[in-house]
Image (cartoon, coloured by chain):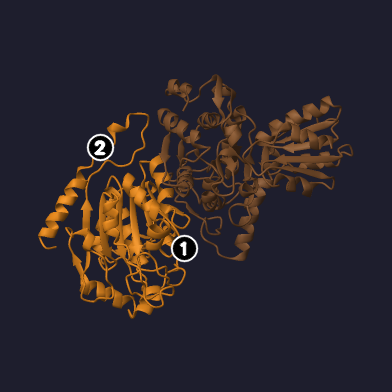
Chain colours: A orange, B brown
Amino acid sequence: MTTAASASNPTRIVETHPIDKVLRADRFPHILCPACGIGSIIHCYVQAIIESGIPLNQHVCVSGIGCSGRAAGYINVDSYHTTHGRAVPFALGIAVYRPDLHVTVISGDGDLTSIGGNHLIHAARRNVNLTVICINNFNYGMTGGQAGPTTPLSAKSSTTPFGSWERPFNLPHLAHAVGASFVARWTVLHIRQLKEAVLRGIHKEGFAFIEVLSPCPTGFGRPNDIGDGLEEMRRYRRRCHVDDNAYLPEIDIDLTNDESPIVVGNFVDVDRPPFHPALGEPASTTAKPDPDRADARTQSRESISNGR
Amino acid sequence: MGADAKVAGSTRLMVGEHFMLGDHACAEGALAAGLDFFAGYPITPSTEICERLAHRLPQVGGRFVQMEDELGSIAAILGASAAGARSLTATSGPGFSLMMENIGLAVMMEIPCVIVDVMRGSPSTGLPTLVGQGDVFQARWGSHGDYSIVAFSPSSPQECFDLTIRAFNVADQLRIPVFLLMDETIGHMTERVVIPPAAQIPRTPRKRPTHAPGEKLFLPFKADSDLIPPMAHAGEGYNVHFTGLTHDERGYPALNAQAHEELVMRLSQKVSAHASEVTLVEEVNLEDAEVVVVAFGCTARSARRAVNLARQRGIKAGLLRVITLWPFPEEQVRRLAGSGRVKRFIVPEINLGQVCREVERLTSLPVDRINRAGGAMISPQSIVEVIAA
C-alpha cells in the first residue's frame, strides 16, 4: 500500500518493504533472539531471490530443525520444514523430480553436519543441484546452547562445561573434499558478499555450500565471554581475512584466539556435471572424469609453496 | 533383474502373463501405478525391487536414486512427492526402523508415498535371507505419537502387483504413507503374474486445489468434509509451507493444545473414516465355519491348505485372510465372533504374537496362537493339529 506522492513533492511514504512479498510477513514477530544472525541471512537469501530474476514460484526453500531450521517458514516461497538432519535428502527429492526448480536448503551447523552429516557429504559427492546455506553459530541454539561438531576447541557450552575437547569441522574444507562445486564462507557482517555468494549458489549448476558464521549471543556468546551479538560482529570485523585462494585444510576457526584470522571468501567455483539420474541412456554421457580434483591438488600445493 | 525386464525396454506396462518373482511383481505394480520416483538402499530380501527399478524406471521416464541410507531414502521420496511425484521406497526391517521418524513426518505433512517392507527374521540383523512377520506392530505404531496408516499384506506375487497399485491409490486418496508388508517368502516366490492392460489399472488422483494460485487465499491444510485437504505441489505458485510441527490450516506452526488436538484427531480420523474402503479380506469356507483361522502373508498359504485338510477330516474350518493389516478388519472379525456359530479362532503368524492380539481384543471366544520366531514358514500340518485339537 502506498500513499500517492504529490506532484510537488516526489517523496513517497511506503508502508511495505520491497522484500515483503518474499517474506511471510503474517508470521512476524519471529522467534529469533535479539542480535541473532539468522534474520540477516534470511534477508540475504530473499535479496538473492529477487536479484536472481527467477520467478518466486521456481524457488523452493527446505530446512531441517533448529533455530536456523525455522528460516524456511519465514520465506514466501514453497517451503518445507522437515525433520532434524533430513533437509538435504528431502531437497534432493524435489530437485531430482523437478530439475527446473531452484532448491535452497537453509539450516544450522548441527542439523547439516552432525545429524545430517552423511546426507550432506553424499549430496555434495553427487553434485546435486542444491544451494546449501549452513548457518554456523557454533552450538545448538534451539535447545539452549549445547556443543556440536562446529564448537571450537575449548569453547564452553552446557554440555562442555570445562571447554570442548573435540576438534571441530572445518566446513569449507569438508565440502570441497567431498565434491561441492561452489564453496564459500562468510559471516553475517559480510552482508553483500553473502548475498552475492547465495546468488552464485542459486545460479550454480550443482552443489553449492555456503557456510555463514552467525552470532548466537544467547547460546554461544554468553558462556564464552562474548558480550553480545555486536561484540561478536566486532570480532568478525577485526579478525576476518578475505582470501578466495585460501588453502582450505588450514582455515579452521579458532574463536578463542583473538590473534588467529578467520578466513572467509568464495573458495571453490568449479564446473562439474550436476546430478541428473539417467533417463535410460548410458551413464557415460553424464558422468565424466573430474579434472577439478587434480587441479585443486595442484593449486593447493602451490598455495603451500606460496606460504599461504 | 530377470530376463523379461531386459526385453521390456521402454514399455511401462508389461501386459501379459509372466512367471515372476514377488519382489519384481511389486516393482512392476509400482510402474503400472505410474511410479515417477524411487529412492532406496539395498537390503535383503527387498533388493530385487530396487534392482528391478534401477533398470526399468529410467527407461520409462522415471527417476531412480540409490541413496546413502534409509533415512535419506524416505526423506527423498517425501520431497519428490511434495513436488508431485508418485514415489516409492523398498526396504526390510532394519531399514524400516530407520525410516520411522520420517514416516511420522509424512503423516504430519500429509505427503502420500508407498513404503515396501519385505519382512525377514528379526529383531536386529536377525535372519536377512529367511522369512519373518514381526513388523506388523511396527508398521502400526513404529513412529512416535498417535496416527493411523494403511498397510497391505500380499500372499502371492500377483497380489504384490495388485496391492502395490492399490497402495499408491490409497496413499494419494488419503494423503498418507501406505505400507506394503511383504515377507521374504512372498518376495522371493516366483509364480504366475498377470499384468492387465492400462485401461484395467485404476488410478485415484490426488485431491488438488480447485483455483489458480493467487486467485484467492489457499489454505493448504484446510480439509474438506472428507477430512482430506487438497494438495499443492512445489513449484506451482501456491507458496505453501509444510512443517512437521503442529500447524494450523495455513500450514503455520501453532504450538498449543487446541491446534494439536484438532490436527492429530483429524489425521487419525481421516483414515478411520475411510477404513471400510481400504479394508480387504479374503473369506475361505467361512459360511459354516466353526473354527476360523486368521492369517496373512505367506502364512495364509499354509492356513489355506490346513483348512482344506481339516475339511477333509470333516472339521468345519474356515480362513479369514487378512489382506489389509491396518486398519485391522475389525468388523469382519466381530461379525464372525458374534455369529453364534464360530467357536474359536486360530492365529498362526511368524512372530511371537501380534495379529493375535488384535483378534483377542475383538472377541471373547478362545484364540489359539501359533507362533514361530522366524526363519521358516509355519507348516499346514502344524495348523491342522491345532484346528483338530
Relative vertical location of residue A213 with respect to residue B20 in this rendering, above or below: below
Labels 2, 1: front one: 2
- Name the residue: 41% across, 46% down: B68
- Same-subunit check for callouts 2 and 1: yes
Q: Is residue B219 visible?
A: no
Measured as percent of width and height from the top left, residue A164 is found at: 36, 72
Q: Chain of mark 1?
A: A
Query: Pointers 2 and 1 in contact (CB under 8 A)?
Result: no
Q: CA distance from mark 2 to mark 1?
A: 46 Å
Q: Secondary structure at mark 1?
A: helix
Relative vertical location of residue B290 with respect to residue B361 in this rendering, above or below: above
- Name the residue: 77% across, 33% down: B319
> Amino acid under label 2?
Lys
Towards the viewer: B218 or B331: B331
- Say which quadrant the C terminus of chain B sits in: top right
Relative vertical location of residue A148 with respect to residue A158 in this rendering, above or below: above
Q: Residues within 10 Å of mark 2 (few under 14, many from 20)?
A: few
Specify whether B72 is left or right of B200: left
Specify whether B120 is left or right of A150: right
Disc 1: which residue: A27
Q: Residues within 10 Å of mark 1 (few under 14, many from 20)?
A: few
> Amino acid under label 1?
Arg
- Name the residue: 25% across, 37% down: A288
Specify whether A245 is left or right of B35: left
- Residue extending farthest to the top is B16
